[in-house]
Image (spheres, grey):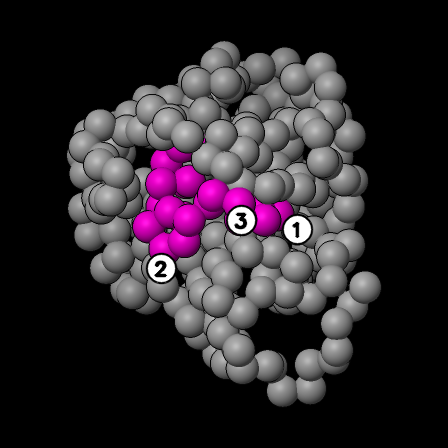
Amino acid sequence: MSSPTTLEGSTPDRPPHDPSLRRSLALFRSFRQEQTDPENCYGLLARDSADQIERHISLDDALVIDIGGGSGYFTEEFRLRGARTCLVEPDLRELTAQGRAPHHAVMADGCRLPFADGAADVCFSSNVLEHVPEPRTFLNEMVRVTRPGGLIYCAFTNWFSPWGGHETAPWHYFGADRARRRYLKRTGRPAKHTLGRNLFAVHIGPTMRHVRSREDVTVLTARSRYAPFLAEALPRLPGIREFATWNLLLILRRSTTPMPGSSGPRT
């Protein structure tokens, strides 16, 4: 099967996971066009995400669970690379945003995944963690449904990131309510996200401590997802990381060590 187009600078055995200014600029340019050209924006991000996964595991014939995958941009990229996929999305409007629901999609809560323990080779989540009220439960479920030796890919925008308030950013630094009022006044329509309802203040420090405290995962990558420089150094700097990381990417490998007090498989 031929390889899909990737970001410039990649090769078959070295995807563009390494920081580069060209890669970061391409992602930022596409990100600014998210509302007007979502296909280009999410298509590029999906290719970049798949490249990073394939640095650690082949997607060919892998079973990938895409949690919160919306209308399926990431799922489609995984399928192009030979993966078997299941998309999990709780919002019907997001699921059918492209006119119809993708194949092999289910409506379900990411904090209660309808899969048995160890079902997936890869459990994937892009910019979903900040939209769930129980981020630790969400991460625990991602680990639970991943087989020993499999990968957990989780990227999220933390609250103190310059984009932490999403469409109301950077005015969320002055208070979420004030930022929403300003957005309504400026655009004439209410903001899509409301802190405490469908957007939550997730922070890098507590998230890092949680995943590192687990005995059943190994942290392969903890880096700024988009930064061209110091991508792996930024998340290690307390305080500074909450502002400078922008978006944290975690890639974990599920180990064979069970968590103390864990139950048997859930079916």
The residue closer to the viewer here, 94 or 9, is 9
* C-alpha separation, residue under disc 3 versus residue under disc 2: 23 Å
Are there few (<14), some (14-19), or many (20+) residues within 10 Å of tag 3? some
Say if the magenta span includes residue 242. Answer: no
Quadrant of the image containing the C terminus:
bottom right
Q: How far from the left and from the top, in percent, is residue 154?
A: 49, 52
Q: From where the camera sits, is residue 173 visible?
A: no
Quadrant of the image containing the N terminus:
top left
Q: How far from the left and from the top, in percent, is residue 117?
A: 69, 66
Q: Residue at x 38, y 22 (%)?
A: 30
Q: In the image, is residue 108 above or below residue 2?
A: below
* C-alpha separation, residue under disc 3 versus residue under disc 1: 26 Å
Per the image, label 1 sits on a secondary structure element best described as: loop
Q: Residue at x 37, y 36 (%)?
A: 48
The residue closer to the viewer here, 213 or 256, is 256
**What residue did someone put label 2 on?**
222
Are there few (<14), some (14-19), or many (20+) residues within 10 Å of tag 1? many
Q: How far from the left and from the top, in percent, is residue 89?
A: 71, 39
Q: Amino acid at mark 3?
A: Ala
Q: From where the camera sits, is residue 80 visible?
A: yes
The residue closer to the viewer here, 209 or 14, is 14
Say if the magenta span includes residue 49. Answer: yes
**What residue did someone put label 3 on?**
62
Q: In the image, is residue 167 above or below residue 189?
A: below
Label of residue 132 in the image: 1
